[in-house]
Image (tube, rainbow, N blue to C red):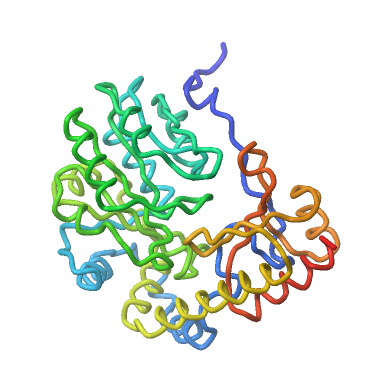
Amino acid sequence: MKYYVNEHIKNTQRVFPGQGRYDYYRYDMNENPEGLPKEFVDSVLKEITPEFLSVYPEPDRFLQKYADYIGAEYENVLTTNGSDMAIRYLLETFGEVGKEVVTVSPSFEMYWVNCSILGLKHVPVSYEEDLTICIDKILAAITSDTRIIVLLNPNNPVGNVYSEEELEQVIERAKEVGAIVIIDEAYHYFYPNTFLRYALNEENVVVLRTFSKLMSLAACRLGVIISNPEIINYVKKGRLTFDANSIALLFAERLIDNPDIIEQMIDIENRGKKYTLDSLREHGYECRDCRGNFIFVKPNHDAKEVSDRLADKKKVLVHPYGNPLLKKYIRVSIGSCEAMKIFLDAFYEIDA
């Protein structure tokens, strides 16, 4: 007798991140190439005792500090095991089997992956040839069957952003059809025009944050959902009891306790981005500031071949694309000037 398999999961096509990246210079997944300051990491590690590890996670202390940090209330915030899990929870809670989730395309793949897993209909709105997004096309894609609209601000991988006028048009259209709007702000530290106030004041808006990018805690997995208390309460009902782990919560809490470290890392990455873009343009390259902690570069040679040669010859990882709109480019994560010099030296040699 054949066992049962959920058809939605059975038919989902997945491509998982490559393994064996530890021995490489990693500019391919929008991580911080160098991570948090070592002295800060060492100080937090001293707090991780055998007793600390024996106790189930308690997120409330961090959540209260985080709420204060962003100017919200405890009832407005919820931790998750990375923003990946936040996406799953939101689509499970507010999606409806057979109904629609509108996103731009290309975008972060976990939105369409979760649509497939959960039996939701993904409605992608394509970029224009010049890598801009037409807001009228997003509005036109929202129908009575739409349950969720997703806007990444800035978007990964293209890096476009939305104006307040555009967002307000989407929010109002979503209200007309009874949908929620998810604003993914994974890269908001690199583009400070946050839409946080809409999540706190509107009935149908959610903002997502992550500690994997600037905060450099990708290994620990910590995300935050920010919204009105009603939406937070609905998501709480469906979440795992112990979702975010204690080590992630401790590191995140200590970062909030030391905002000067956050400001230092923003400054380091901003200087690293300017250094990289200036150097590439001086060398005659077409490149794009994607507003997040990453840029696009158009190599002189085939982008996939350049990416492969960087990995094979220089142990430098960058992100190429199969998408027709993006296949001429590589995406490069940004770090300090020192980290970016390693990439640039390798890139100029390989793409000569």
Above or below, 107 relative to 55: above
Q: Is residue 12 above or below residue 77?
A: above
- Residue that appears at 24% across and 73% down: 69
- Residue located 69% across and 72% down the image: 282
- Quadrant for residue 150, please give it: top left
The total number of labels drawn is 0
Question: Relative to residue 4, is residue 262 depicted above or below?
Answer: below
Point out residue 28 in the picture as x, y percentages from the top left corner. Answer: 64, 58
In-front residue for pair 80/245: 80
> On the rendered image, what quadrant is the C terminus found in?
bottom right
Quadrant of residue 197 within the rendered picture: bottom left
Relative placement, left or right, of 76 versus 210 is: left
Residue at horizontal 62 percent and vertical 59 percent from the top: 287
Residue 265 is situated, as x and y percent measured from the top left of the image, at 47, 78
Along the line of sight, which residue is nearer the eye, 46 or 145? Answer: 145
In front: 150, or 289? 289
Quarter residue 34 falls in:
bottom right
Residue 324 location (% of width, % of height):
64, 36
> In the image, is 207 to the left or to the right of 201?
right
Q: Which residue ends up furthest to the top in the rendered image? A: 1
The N terminus: image quadrant? top right
Q: Residue at x 52, y 75 (%)?
A: 269
Q: Is residue 206 left or right of residue 54?
A: left
Horizontally, residue 103 falls left or right of residue 60, namely: right
